[in-house]
Amino acid sequence: MDPVRLGLALRALRIRRGLRQVDVASSAGVSQSTVSNLERGSIHRTPLATIGRVAAVLGGDLDVRVRWRGAEMDRLLDEGHARLVNLITHRLRARDWDVIVEATFSI
């Protein structure tokens, strides 16, 4: 998560909605200084739930992702499924089944 980009996005949404920082703070149940800090990209001590509430007040939602070595995170998360597919494929082929595992690619 890029804290500066997050802050710019929250500020842009607030301005688009015609709200003051104090309006957002009141609706989100936080202080005006918290909203100000978030808009300046100072998020390090702010719980994700709080950032999410502020975003929700502004009509947005918080999307936090963990990235790791490009597409490797998807492969890591899919590791259990891949083992299961390999196991079933092996068992079916052992019984003379023709098995073609589907692979999809996204460009």
Image (cartoon, rainbow, N blue to C red):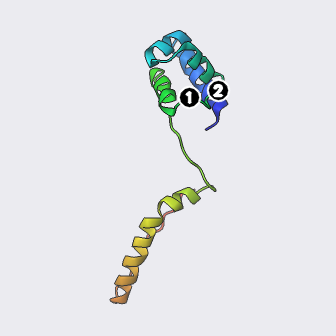
Residue sitting at x 48%, y 21%: 58
Residue sitting at x 55%, y 13%: 32
- Which mark is on residue 42? 2
Check if mark 2's residue and mark 1's residue have beta carbons within 8 Å.
Answer: yes
Q: Secondary structure at mark 1?
A: loop
In x, y percent, where is residue 103? 48, 68
Q: In which quarter of the view is residue 21 placed?
A: top right
In x, y percent, where is residue 7? 62, 26
| Residue designated by label 1 | 46
Residue sitting at x 51%, y 33%: 48
Vertical relation: 98 (above or below) 70: below
> Is residue 88 found left or right of 36 in the rendered image?
left
Local packing at callout 1 (Cα closer than 10 Å; few below 14, some 14-19, many 20+) is few
Instruction: List the single residue furthest toward the front.
Output: 45
Local packing at callout 2 (Cα closer than 10 Å; few below 14, some 14-19, many 20+) is some
Task: Tell me which amino acid carries mark 1.
Answer: Thr
